[in-house]
Image (cartoon, rainbow, N blue to C red):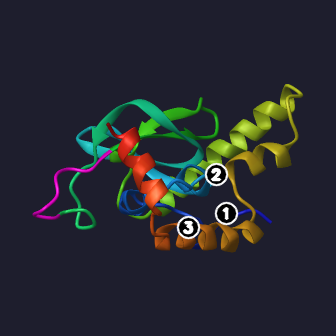
Amino acid sequence: ELVRELADVTKVQLKREDLEKIVDQPMALEVVKGFFVRIGLGQNQGKPVYRMARIMEVKHGTKFYDLPPSIANISATTSARKTDLILILGYPGARNKESRLDSISNHVIEQNERDKYLLDLKEKSKLMRSTGNGAQEEIEEKYLPALKEMSGMQQSLSATMAHTLTAEELKDLVQRKK
């Protein structure tokens, strides 16, 4: 069975502050794959527009950028944290989109955002079936994790958050950020 209910979706959602906590961890590139995020798309008639999306891949970009200040990383003794991580986000019926961490919301995915995601997934499934380009299950599995995967995803994330960088990992991180 696949994750569909909002309560389950939010259990495998990463907020920007979660991503900030593990941005420097070497295993972050793999661990965050499959999680959901809430991404800001801009405004419509003066109101912010958000969508639920799934992290399909993470890569190092070509430029470093500052992470926005947050409770998690504000310190009088440190300068702004930088990262070059780029999330590749999947959304049913649209091409994968590259996104910086600063466009990820710190708030939970809302019911209407989950509903829109599932509606668009249903439409994509119909379209793909009608053109003979894939089975519904295949398409849904690309955009929805299985319920049985959730605990493994959460455990991997917890282990990554608790990981202390080794001297070698710290050296590599400093070298990469030069």
Which residue: 78% across, 43% down?
Answer: 139
Q: CA distance from mark 3 to mark 2?
A: 25 Å
Quadrant in which the N terminus appears: bottom right
Q: Is residue 76 magenta?
A: yes
Residue hosting label 3: 157
Front-most of 128 and 12?
12
Q: State the CA–CA distance, disc 1 to disc 3.
A: 20 Å
CB within 8 Å, label 1 to label 2 = yes
Q: Quadrant of residue 115?
A: bottom right
Nearer to me, 125 or 52: 52
Position of residue 62 measured from the top left corner of the image (x, y, whole percent):
41, 27
The boundaries of the magenta stretch are 75-82
Tell us which disc is closer to us: 3 or 2.
Answer: 3
Nearer the observer, 88 or 144: 88
Provide the residue designation for mark 1. Answer: 4
> Is 59 on the left or on the right of 118, as rendered?
left
Q: CA distance from mark 1 to mark 2?
A: 8 Å
Which kind of residue does numbered mark 3 sit on?
Leu
Whether residue 69 sits left or right of residue 177 in the image: it is: left
Which residue is outermost to the left? 76
Tell me the tag on residue 118: 2
Name the residue type under label 2: Leu
Q: Residue at x 28, y 66 (%)?
A: 72
Determine crowd level at label 3: few under 14, some 14-19, many 20+ residues with C-alpha closer than 10 A. Answer: many
